[in-house]
Image (tube, rainbow, N blue to C red):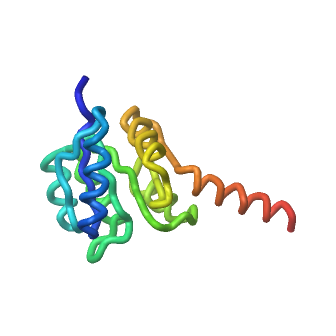
């Protein structure tokens, strides 16, 4: 079985190294590249064309949201999975609007990250449980008003 090739984009070295370690410990995945900025991702992702890009949205310079748009506009076939500290639905919406296939928060479990990668690899959109719960709370609150 061919491993899913992954690029990790995050400005924090420890985050990149930790995610690489976790992902490479699963036989389905292989991290082939790490980028520390949106600018680097815009150049390296289209050149390497990994199957999946795990893109932090809060990057210095070009944000992960903007880098996602530029990568998608380049025609690169890589599928992008946005990752952020933010659980507010508008962040997930902005990433999906720019062409990302999924969104996770940094509170997501390792298992949920694996699930998201597998779903996005199949061509399905994936929104993490934390964001879905936030949407549900917003709808419930609006119904009470």
Percent of width and height locating residue 102: 45, 49
Q: Total label count?
A: 0
Outermost residue toward the bottom in this view? 61
Residue 143 occupies quadrant: bottom right
Percent of width and height locating residue 127: 52, 49
Tell me if residue 77 can be seen. no
Q: What residue is drawn where x is 50% and y is 64%?
A: 91
Rendered view: 81 above or below 92? above
Q: What residue is drawn where x is 36% and y is 36%?
A: 121
Residue 95 occupies quadrant: bottom left
Rendered view: 46 above or below 137? above
The residue closer to the viewer here, 6 or 68, is 6
Percent of width and height locating residue 84: 43, 64
Horizontal side of residue 41 vs 120, given as left or right:
left
The residue closer to the viewer here, 121 or 114, is 114
State which quarter of the image contains the N terminus.
top left
State which quarter of the image contains the C terminus.
bottom right
Tell me if residue 28 can be seen. yes
Q: What residue is drawn where x is 22% and y is 46%?
A: 31
Outermost residue toward the top in this view? 1
The residue closer to the viewer here, 29 or 56, is 29
């Amino acid at each position: 079985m061919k491993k899913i090739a992954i690029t990790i984009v995050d400005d924090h070295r420890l985050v990149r190294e930790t995610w690489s370690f976790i992902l490479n410990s699963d036989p389905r995945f292989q991290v082939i590249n790490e980028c520390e900025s949106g600018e680097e991702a815009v150049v390296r992702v289209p050149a390497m064309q990994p199957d999946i890009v795990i893109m932090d949205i809060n990057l210095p310079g070009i944000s992960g949201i903007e880098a996602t748009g530029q990568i998608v506009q380049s025609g690169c076939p890589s599928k992008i999975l946005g990752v952020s500290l933010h659980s507010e639905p508008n962040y997930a919406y902005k990433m999906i609007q720019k062409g990302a296939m999924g969104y996770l928060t940094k509170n997501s479990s390792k298992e949920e990250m694996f699930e998201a990668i597998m779903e996005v690899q199949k061509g399905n959109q994936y929104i993490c449980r934390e964001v879905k719960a936030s949407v549900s709370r917003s709808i419930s609150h609006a119904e009470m008003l």
